[in-house]
Image: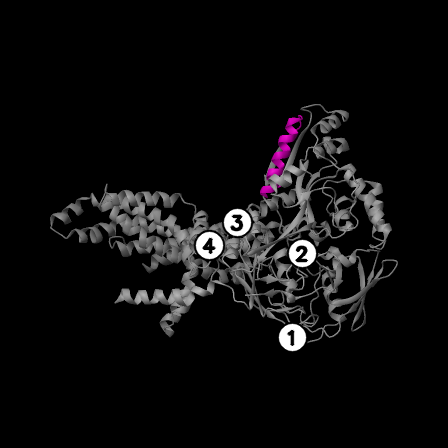
Amino acid sequence: MRIRLFLVALLVMVVGLGGIAYANSDTLVIGSGAEAVGLDPRLETDVPSFERINVIMEPLVKFDVEMNLVPALATDWEFSDDALTLTFYLREGVKWHDGKPFTAEDVKYTFEWVLDPNNAAPNRGLYADIDRIEVVNDHVVSFHLGKPYSFLLNNIARMPITPAHDGDREDFRQAPIGTGPYKLVQWTRDDRMVLVANEEYWGGKPNIPNLVFRAIPENATRLLAFEAGEIDIYQGGVVPQELPRLEADPRFVVQRVPGTGYNYLGFNTQVGALSDVRVRQAINYLINREGIVTRVLNNIGTPGVGPVPETLPWFNPDVQRYEYNPEKAKELLREAGYGPGDISLRLFTNENPDRVRIAEILQFEAQQIGVKIEVFVEEWGAYLSRIQETDDFDIFILGWSGQLDPDRAMIRQFHTDGANNYGKYSNERLDYLLEYGRTVPPDSQESIEIYREAQEIVVREVPYGFINYSEEVGLHHNYIKNWRVHPYGAGAWQDVHLIVKER
Amino acid sequence: MIRYIVRRLVQMIPLLLGISILVFLLVHLSPGDPVRMLLGEEATEEDVERLNAIYGFDLPLHIQYFRWLSNALRGNLGVSIRQGISVTTLLSERLGATLELAVVSVLIAVALGIPLGIIAAVRRGSLVDYFSMILALVGVSTPGFWLGLMLLTHVALKVDFLPMFGRDGSIFGGLWILITQLRVDVLLEGLRHVLLPAVSIGTGMMAIITRLTRSSMLEVLGKDYIRTAKAKGLNNQVVVLKHALRNALLPVITIIGIQFGAMLGGAVVTETVFAWPGVGRLIVNAIRQRDFPIIQGGVLMMAVVFALVNLAVDISYALVNPRIRYD
C-alpha cells in the first residue's frame, strides 16, 4: 500500500513538473554571472548590478552598439564652445513607474546627490568638475562646469537618472523605480530577480511581458542551464574552450564584437632598471602578443597596440609596433648597459588564470635573454592594495574596461597627477596634451590630432606594455531576436523592449 | 541535565568573544581594504579617504571593535558595506537554504551509510563488504564540485524533472503545506531542486559514515557481551541492531555532528556549482570584498551553530547510551 502511494506520488512529480524546466515564451530568462550588489546607480560599481539597473532605469544619453551616443531620457544636448556648459533637452511625456512625470528636477537631484561628499557615492570623481546644475524649465537642464571637460557626456551616459520624489526612500536600493522598459517585481538575493514589462514605456510596450535574471556564478553550470533551455541569454564570461562547439550548434547564436578594454603590463617607472625607457622597451619586445591571444586567450581578443581601442576615431594606427623580437630586446638592454644576469625583476598578478599564464610566458622569454623575473600571484584584495598603496613592485598585470574615449583611456593612467598612475610615469608634453584635450570639442579634427600625438608618446615611452584588446562575446538561443552584444559588456543593454522570443 | 546544558551555554560566551576578536584581527590585519575593493582599479585617493571616513574605517582598531561589540550585544551585527543591508537580514534570508541543504545531505548520507556499514561489518570479507568499501573509497575521494558537475552533465541534462540550478521554495515550508493543506506540489518543487546538490555533498559524507560504522561495528562485535548475547540464543538480528549498533553509533554520531557543522559554512563550492543561495557563498564573497560586518557576523553565527550542534551531539550520547549521564 505504502509503495503504491509512493509510486503515485512519483508519477505526479514526473508528469506534473516535467515541463517546468523550460522557460515560458512570455518570459525572457537571463543567466547572469553574479548577483547584483544593489540597484541604485549612484552607489553601485559592478557589472552585474548595472546589468539589472539598465533595464529599470535610463541615463540621459547612452551608447549604442556602434558606440555612438544616442538619445535616451534627453532628446538633444549641446556643449558650449568653451566646454563649460552642457545643456540637455529632456524627453517629454516620460513617466516614472509610479506614474509621476519625469522632469529636470530628477536630473538635478541625481547628480547633486552623487556630488554631495557626505553621500557614499563611489564614482563622485567622474562628475567632480560639475559646479552647479541649473533647472531652466521642466524639460531643460544645464550643467555648469568649474573647468572645461569636453568628455563629460560619456560619464553622464554611465549614470541612470533616479527619481527626486522617491530616491531617498530607505529601501530604494533594493526596490527602486525607474523610467525604463521593465519594472521590478521581486528580488530574492543570490537566486532571482523578477521584472514585468512597463506598459507605458515611452519607447513602446516591451515585446516580452516578463523578464527574469538568474544569478549562476559557476560558468559550467550556467552553460549547462543555457543548453538545457532554462536560460535564453547567457551573460558574463563564456568558457573560451566551448566557443567552437557552441558556434557550430544551430540552436545557438554566438556574437562577437571588439570590446572597450585591454590588458597590460604596468611598469614601475621610478625604480631600478625599469626607470630606463630602453629596458621597458626591451621587455615590451618580449611580449608575444599573437601567441598569447591564440594560446592563452583562445582567440578572444586581439593583440594590443596602445591605450585607445581600435574602434574609436582617436585610435592612432601609426604608432610604433612592438612585434615579438628577443634579438631587439637584447640589443636595447646592451645599449642601456645591462648584460645577461644584471637585471632581476618582481612581477605581480592576481589569481586570474590568464594573467598567471601570461606572467609565466614572460618569465620564460625573459630568462632566454638573461633577465630574471620572479612571479608573485596574490589574492585580488591584497594585490589591489599593493598596486594602489605602495610602490613595492616592478611589474604588474592589470586590465582596464570601459575605455570609451581617449581622455578616459589616458589621463588617469599617464598624467603625472593621474589618480591611477601606479607606475609614477611622468612626461611634461603628455600632461599638456591630456589637459588641453579636455577643452577641445571631441568631434573635432584638433581633438583627434591631440590624442594621436599622446598615444605616440605613451607607446614610445612604454609606461605600459599593451598585451591585448578585449572582445565581448554574446551567447543566446536562436529563437531570441533583436538582441545584440554590446562593446561595453553585460552591463549595457540596447533596446531591451524590442527583444523577441519566438517559441 | 538542564544544569549541564545551562553550564555549556554559559561556557560558549568566552568562546564566542575569543572568536570575534580573532576574526576581527584577521580581517583587519590582512592586506586589502573594503573601500578599495568597492572602488576597484579606478579608485582615486580622494574618494578612498572620503569613503573611509563615512564608514568609520579611519578610527583606531580597538574603537572599531568595541563599537561593533556593543552593537552586536544588542543584536545588531551591523550593515554590509557593499550592499547597505543589515547583516542579520542577509544571514537570516540564507540560513534556511543552508540548513535545508545540510539536513537533506545528512539524511541521504545516514540513510545509506549506516546500513551499508552494518552489512559490511556483519559480512566481513564478503563481496558486499568489498563493494561497500570500494564505494566508500570512491565516495570519499570524489570532490563534491566535480560530482556536482558530473551530475549536471549526465543526469540533470537528460532528466527533465531535475533542474540545473537554483532553489525553489523551502522544503520545510513544503512539509508544512503538505500537513496543513494536503498539497504536495510545494514540497516536490523544493525536493527536486535540493536533490542533486544534496547528493553531491552527501556522497562524501556517506563514505565516511560507512567506513566508520563498519570499523566501529567490527570492534563492538568482538566484545564479550556480544558473545554472551549470542550464547543466550538471541536472534542474530536483535544482537546486531540492538546490542551492537547502539554502542557502535557513538563515534558515528560525533562525526555526523562535525560534518553537519562543517556543512553550514563549508558547502561553498557546492553552493556555487548549483547556484544555491546559501550562507557559505555570502561569506566567501564578503571575504573577497572585505565586507567586514558580514564576515564578522557570519563567522560568529557559524560558531554559535557549531557549538549548539556539538551540544546536541553530547546530549544525544545520553539518549543512545543511557549509561552516559550529565550532571
The structure residue drawn at horizontal position 16% and vertical position 51%, both measured from the top left corner, is B236
- Which numbered disc flags the more N-terminal residue, 2 or 1? 1
Q: Confirm or deny contact between disc 3 and disc 4 (CB under 8 A).
A: no
Could you tell me the amino acid type at mark 1? Asp
Quarter-of-image position of residue A397: top right
Q: Which residues are magenta?
A: A349-373
Q: Which residue is mark 4?
A: B302
Could you tell me the amino acid type at mark 3? Val
Residue A64 numbered tag: none
Report whether A4 appears left or right of B155: left
Q: Which residue is mark 2?
A: A486
Q: Mark 2 and mark 1: span between their CA atoms?
A: 30 Å
Closer to the camera, A3 or B248?
Answer: A3
Q: Confirm or deny contact between disc 3 and disc 1 (CB under 8 A).
A: no
- On whether disc 2 and disc 1 are found on a single subunit, the reply is yes
Name the main secondary structure of what is drawn in magenta.
helix
